[in-house]
Image (cartoon, rainbow, N blue to C red):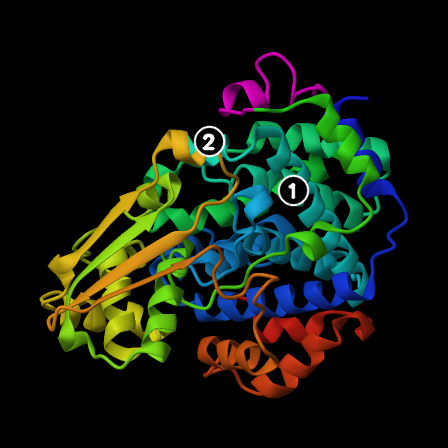
């Protein structure tokens, strides 16, 4: 079978996911909806709403577009290493839009989420991290294709229908990392969600493309900087018993900024707990990250809140000043306030070399703080807070939900319903969060 046929066959199976997988899916869905609500007034979201304002009764694809843009707008949404993507920002809005249109309940939503997430992992495995390092935005490429599989399953399509959907989605996958730090980046998630819904709708008419378009000549692997794919990987997919959400997981964000900063920020937080010092005592900060991470953080002296989310300098200064970062740190007044902070020019960043990264699947990010009294504090992290190895506590999940949804009426009641979403016969209560 082709890669698409293999993925479609896996997706079309009767869903039997563990209680752990279901719980992690609940948490991811809730986290994403909180991020969506927090991003509703962002410029990117408002631009999309203005552009599609003529749709009085928007179809699922347009609903997905609007809400996925909002979910990714403030870069607080989760990271997914196998897809090199913000997986849930595309998945959840697309699936919720279709579930509302098809009048599906919470159990179907959770199963579709797990199917779409695993499909993203499979597609990411085809191209490997080289795809992302080359400059492709995995959220809008891999995210589109994998989400399309979840949408097709939710719409009740069979194995052949899911395969057609995947092939169509490959032709709709696009988005470059060169747009990071601009309002167009959140639109990438919206575009991917809309395209995933459209791919399934088009496939339902019988539209079809090549089934070897992932691995075949002039296909996704060849054109999108794939590396190291082999048929053995497909055999491994079929042998795996646990879902990717249990083995690798999606990683919710502790901080509302680019995930490329997070291991450094968490390392600084670790140092702040262990040692007594203030931001005023820091003479300089040296950071070492991955190659792709360094490329993501293009703004040394950010001029606006979007650039600030992609500025190691700005995020480090926030952490040193307050010991944490919040949604309010990424507003125009706060960015202007910190524009002339004395530490902004004392943060430097380098990356591992290509030959070093070639020898390891994951290298740590490390930070060195030099204090004015001559002390040198060093710490490194292999993972950021929120990974399966260091998950959020129940309090931290609620704290983030509150940070995002402080203006949401009955937010506590909605949060409780989200925790048991599989028991919901319909999802109309989510209209309070959606735009």
* Residue drawn at 14 percent across, 76 percent down: 280
> At which x and y percent is residue 161?
81, 34
Query: Horizontal placement of 175 versus 105: left or right?
Result: left
- In the depicted structure, whether residue 419 falls above or below residue 240: below
Helix or strand or loop: what does disc 2 sit on? loop
Q: Nearer the viewer, mark 1 or mark 2?
A: 2
Q: Image check: 18 left or right of 381?
A: right
Question: Which region of the structure is painted magenta?
Answer: 207-227
Query: Which residue bears the numbered disc 2?
Result: 358
Marker disc for residue 67: none
Residue 60 visible in the displayed image:
yes
Q: Looking at the image, tell me whether mark 1 or mark 2 is earlier in sequence order.
A: 1
Residue assigned mark 1: 121
Left-right relation of 247 to 398: right
Front residue (pair 235, 428) = 235
Q: Residues within 10 Å of mark 2 (few under 14, many from 20)?
A: few
For residue 355, above or below residue 349: above
Q: Do callouts 1 and 2 mark residues in contact (Cβ within 8 Å)?
A: no
Q: Residue furthest right?
A: 14
């Amino acid at each position: 079978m082709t890669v698409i046929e293999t993925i479609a066959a896996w997706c079309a199976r009767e869903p039997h996911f563990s209680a752990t997988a279901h719980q992690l899916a609940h948490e991811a869905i809730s986290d994403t909806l909180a991020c969506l609500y927090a991003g509703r007034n962002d410029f990117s979201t408002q631009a999309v709403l203005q552009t599609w304002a003529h749709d009085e009764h928007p179809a699922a694809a347009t609903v997905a577009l609007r809400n996925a843009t909002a979910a990714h707008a403030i870069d607080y949404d989760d990271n997914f290493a196998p897809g090199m993507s913000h997986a849930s920002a595309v998945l959840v809005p697309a699936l919720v839009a279709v579930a509302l249109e098809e009048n599906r309940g919470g159990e179907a939503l959770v199963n579709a989420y797990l199917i779409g997430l695993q499909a993203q992992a499979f597609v990411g495995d085809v191209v490997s991290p080289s795809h992302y390092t080359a400059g492709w935005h995995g959220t809008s490429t891999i995210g589109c294709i994998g989400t399309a599989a979840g949408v097709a399953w939710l719409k009740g399509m069979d194995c052949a229908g899911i395969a057609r959907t995947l092939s169509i989605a490959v032709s709709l996958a696009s988005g470059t990392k060169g747009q990071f730090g601009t309002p167009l980046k959140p639109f990438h998630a919206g575009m991917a969600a809309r395209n995933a819904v459209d791919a399934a709708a088009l496939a339902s008419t019988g539209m079809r493309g090549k089934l070897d378009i992932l691995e075949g000549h002039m296909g996704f692997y060849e054109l999108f900087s794939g590396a190291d794919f082999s048929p053995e990987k497909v055999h491994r997919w079929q042998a795996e018993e646990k879902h990717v959400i249990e083995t690798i997981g999606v990683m919710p964000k502790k901080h509302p900024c680019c995930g490329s900063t997070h291991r450094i920020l968490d390392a600084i937080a670790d140092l702040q707990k262990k040692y007594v010092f203030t931001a005023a005592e820091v003479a300089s900060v040296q950071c070492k990250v991955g190659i792709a991470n360094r490329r993501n953080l293009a703004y040394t002296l950010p001029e606006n809140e979007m650039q600030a989310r992609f500025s190691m300098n700005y995020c480090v200064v926030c952490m040193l000043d307050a010991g944490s970062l919040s949604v309010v740190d990424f507003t125009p007044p706060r960015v202007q306030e910190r524009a002339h902070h004395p530490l902004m020019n004392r943060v430097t960043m380098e990356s591992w070399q290509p030959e070093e990264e070639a020898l390891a699947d994951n290298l740590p990010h490390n930070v060195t703080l030099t204090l004015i009294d001559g002390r040198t504090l060093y710490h490194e992290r292999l993972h950021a807070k929120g990974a399966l190895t260091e998950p959020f506590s129940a309090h931290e999940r609620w704290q983030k939900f509150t940070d995002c949804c402080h203006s949401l009426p009955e937010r506590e009641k909605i949060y409780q319903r989200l925790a048991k979403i599989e028991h919901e016969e319909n999802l109309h209560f989510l209209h309070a969060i959606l735009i």
